Image: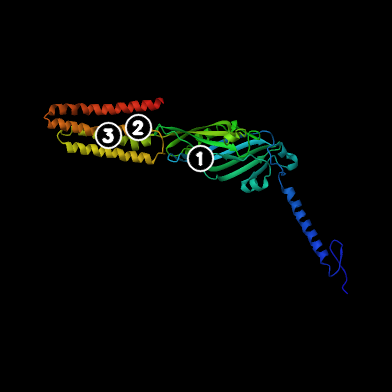
Amino acid sequence: MKPARHSIFGERCDSRGMACGIRSGLIIAVVAVLGIFGSLRPALAIDAGMPNPPASPTVVKCAIIILDVVDIDDVNESFVAEIALLAEWDDPRLAFDAAEEGVDRKIFQGNFQFSEVFTGWWPQLILVNEVGPPDPNAVKIEVYPDGHVRYMDQHNAVLETPMDLRDYPFDSQKLQAELVPFGDNTDDVVLDVHEIYANATDDFVRRNSSVNVAGWMLQSVTFETGETFLNEATKDRRISRLIATIHLQRRSWQLVWQMLFPLLVIVSMIWSIFWVDIDSLADRLNVAFVGVLTIVAYQFVVIDNMPRMSYLTLTDVILLISFVTMSLTIPQSLVIYGLVRKGEEQRAQRIDHISRWAFPLGYMAMLAILVAWYAIN
C-alpha cells in the first residue's frame, strides 16, 4: 500500500486523489498572478483611474509653433508644415513630493511611455482640417510636483484651408489650423492661448530663414479662441477651439518675370502689324493669329497651376485684356484692307498711324485701372 502524500499547502492526498493536485495547482497560479501584479504596481508612475478632466472646465493653454513650411499647393488649397503643439494644464491629482520621489519633475517621452506608462488624464487635441493621420516625430509629457502638466508634440501636418487668390500673383494668404479637444465640450475643456509661446514662431523665423518655403515668405502666426458645435442638433454641446492663422506673402517677382513680362512682350510684338503694308492682309492676319494662340496657351498654363475657382484672379483678367487687345487687331486689319480695296489708302494709313499709339496706350491704361482696382479692394 502506497503511503499518503501531502500537498505543498499541507493537505493530505492519496495516490488516487486528483482533486487535491488540481486545487493546489490553481492556488499556485493565482498566487503567481497576484505576485506579478504586485510587482508591477510600484512601477506605475501615476495611479490609474483618472478618465475625467481634473476640473469643470479644465483650462488648457495651447500654442502651435511653425518649425518649417514644407510645401504650399495652390491647386488643392493645402499646405504641409512641420509644427510643434504645446499644451499646459493643472491636475492636482498628479501632484507628488519632489523630495520623496527624488526628482523635480516626471518625464514621459516617446510613444511607448506616453501610451503605456503615463496613465493620467490628458486632452486629445486634434487639428480639424488636417488631412490623414498625423505623422508624429516626437511626443513628451512633463509632470511637476504641484500637478502642473506640460504636453509637447512635434509632427508633420497636411492641412486643407481655403485660399483667396484674387490678387494672384501679388497675393498674401492666411492659412488656418483649427485645434479642438476631441470628445470634450466646453463644460469639460476650454482652450486658451499660451501667451508665452504666442510669438515663438515669429522669433524662430527671424533666426532661421530656411523656414520659408520657395516662393513664399512667412510673416507671422496669430491665435484666436472661440466655440463651435458639431451640427445644428447638438448646439448645446459646444466645443472650445483655437485657430492659428499663418500669414504668408507670395514672392511675386519670379512669376512676373516668368509669366507676365513675356506676355507683355508678346502683346507688344503684335502691334508690329501696324507697320506692315496696308495691302498685305495675309501677313497681318498671320501675326495676329499667332499672338492670339499664344495667349490661349498661356491661359492653359495658368489654369493648370490654379484651383477651380468661381472668380477671376488678377492674372486671369490680365490674360483676358491681352486676349481682347490682340484679337482687336484682326478686325482692324480687315477694315484697313477694305479701305485699300475701295481706294481710300490715305484714310487707311491714317487709321494705322492712330492705332500705333492708341492700342498701346489703351492697353496700358486698362492694366493700370485693373491693378488700382485690385489694390483698393
Which circle's residue, 1 or 2, is located before the other in the chain?
Answer: 1
Pointer 3 with pointer 1, Cβ within 8 A:
no
From the image, state whether disc 3 or disc 2 is nearer to you: 2
Q: What is the spatial separation of the Cα atoms under label 1 and label 2, in whole angstroms?
A: 29 Å
Q: Position of residue 349 (x, y in %)?
A: 15, 28
Image quarter (top left, top right, bottom left or bottom right) of the C terminus: top left
Image quarter (top left, top right, bottom left or bottom right) of the N terminus: bottom right
Per the rendering, the mark at residue 159 is 1
Q: Position of residue 57 (x, y in %)?
A: 66, 33
Q: What is the spatial separation of the Cα atoms under label 3 and label 2, in whole angstroms?
A: 15 Å
In the picture, measured across the screen, residue 205 lies left or right of residue 288, that is right
Residue beneath label 2, please? 317
Q: Amino acid at mark 2?
A: Val
Determine which quarter of the picture holds residue 326.
top left
Q: Secondary structure at mark 3?
A: helix
In the picture, measured across the screen, residue 310 lies left or right of residue 205, that is left
In the picture, measured across the screen, residue 270 lies left or right of residue 240, that is left
Residue beneath label 3, please? 267
Determine which quarter of the picture holds residue 347.
top left
